[in-house]
Image (cartoon, rainbow, N blue to C red):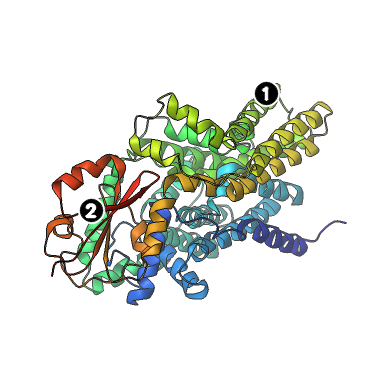
Amino acid sequence: MKLSYRQSQLLIVFLSALLFIPFLGQVHLFDWDEINFAESAREMLITGNWLEVQVDFETFWEKPPLFIWMQAISMKIFGINEFAARFPNAICGILSLLVLFHIGNRLYNRQYAWIWVLVYVGSFLPFFYFKSGIIDPWFNLFIFLGIYYLFRYLTLRNLWFVSLGAMFTGLAVLTKGPVGALIVGLSMLAYLFIIRFKVKIKFQDILLFLLVFSLFGGLWFILMLLNGNSEMIVDFVAYQIRLFQTEDAGHGGFLFYHFVVLLFGVFPASIFALKGFRFTKAKSERANFKRLMQVLFFVVLILFTIVKTKIVHYSSMAYFPMTYLAAYVILNIVNRNYKLSRWMKVSITALGTFYALLLIILSNFDSLKSRLINTGAFDDPFAEAAIQANAGWTGFEILPGIILLAAVITFLIFAIQKRRMHAIVSLFVGSLLFVQLSMILIVPRIERYSQHAAIEFYKAHAGEDVYMRPVGFKSYAHLFYFQKTVQKHPSHNNEFWLMAGDIDKHAYFVIKIQHLEKYLKKYPEVTEIYRKNGFVFCEREKKN
């Protein structure tokens, strides 16, 4: 039975909700980004200050508030927890797939629309981020919609599309900052250059764009200025510049960092997308949109290669053009315009098998970790102690690896039989199940080795009238899970005062094992309570 357009949309909503919403609260939020944003949302609810983003009840000038507002509203509905922090991105996942289906159907046909949806949701990192609590999924969607509607404007000269393009670009700025407008501006400028500026843009259209963009992207900044927070705006702009010039917070990387991230992280789409970078001489709307997607990909890749700070999700905007190009290639393979080349089959088989075997080995980590310790593989005392945690492996963790391996084998069999659509569907469905089951079965085990012991301690003392502080390492986890409230004493964040000063209430400290001796020697009044998985939990009695 052939589904209507509306039935197809409803099916996408149902299936994507089934994929993105369950198990959102299964594992603790991860330091830094997930907890950072969730903590800002929690503090919005506690203080009632929805205009100013805060962390530890102090102004946090690194991010605008739109995504934090979404999380705060979610927490208002579902409570202050992991599910609520991640729920906005589940909604973003549903909307993103609907957007891809709509654009794919309009530009090509229903077949291409379904392929694009499958390619996006069936690739590793694009799926993964919709289950997270970070800003980027919404940021990327707004940028993509901004670019798409500006493209529609250049094609049809419709002022409605100018307004939509400006609105979504403004929302991108309100989500993460001016880099959203920079990506849109550079992409459209490069596209106009490629088509030799053969489009006449009216001056009044530019004014309309700037007006709508300022309304959506600049309103919060204007409100901050009117509220007397001009210093925060200056700090915000300075931070954006620093991200380009320095390796912020130690997040550095080699020159081709994002090339590697996109090639290996957006598997299997990345393999097909490689063939989609062929230059198209045609001048149809489809051909022009393909050029624009190629431009967008390289703008993102070059821009974040230049940026000194290297973080995996910085290049996540490239997922949209990559999956578009992959779907374009796959459509041509299915329709027998392109061959399913040998290098594609070899690359997919090699990478898919590698990931499957890696996860199968990881599922046996408990039996391997003693050997790793005995061979002296760890120079870091914290890492050596952390992997000795009881992660609760059950044996079922092998399942995602087996499913991916089976998907690769099935892909090869169908490819040899020239049943191309069957090969594509089996590969991407298998990849989707691999990521979904890995997040359900593997991620909670990994979290046990990293931060679980510390969060367990914070939660055990949540709500108590005491001081809680990690020492010697940066973290936001104690704020969210200890449920820290506004502190009256001006020195509540001063390490020396908490560990040696005249404190007015009991204090707890979390120290990584390699720093313990230094701190206990420097602050003799601090005593150890217990240690677990690389963390040492200490306390200090209040002064009478």
Q: Taking 353 as reference, is 178 above or below it?
A: below
Residue 242: numbered disc: none
Left or right: 458 with respect to 521?
A: right
Residue 235 vs residue 468, the one in the foreground: 468
Left or right: 177 with respect to 297?
A: left
Q: Position of residue 135 (x, y in %)?
A: 45, 56
Q: Position of residue 93 (x, y in %)?
A: 59, 57
Residue occupying the point 73% across, 36% down: 407
Question: Farthest bottom residue?
Answer: 48
Tag 2 secondary structure = strand
Mark 2 closeness class: few <14, some 14–19, many ≥20 residues within 10 Å: some
Residue occupying the point 14% across, 59% down: 497
Residue 289 vs residue 511, the one in the foreground: 511
Residue 133 vs residue 458, the one in the foreground: 458
Tag 1 secondary structure = helix
Q: Position of residue 371 (x, y in %)?
A: 49, 27
Label 2: which residue?
527
Residue type (three-letter) at the residue carrying disc 2: Thr
On the image, which quarter does residue 90 sit in?
bottom right
Residue occupying the point 79% across, 39% down: 421
Quadrant containing the N terminus in the rendered view:
bottom right
Label 1: which residue?
346
Mark 1 closeness class: few <14, some 14–19, many ≥20 residues within 10 Å: few
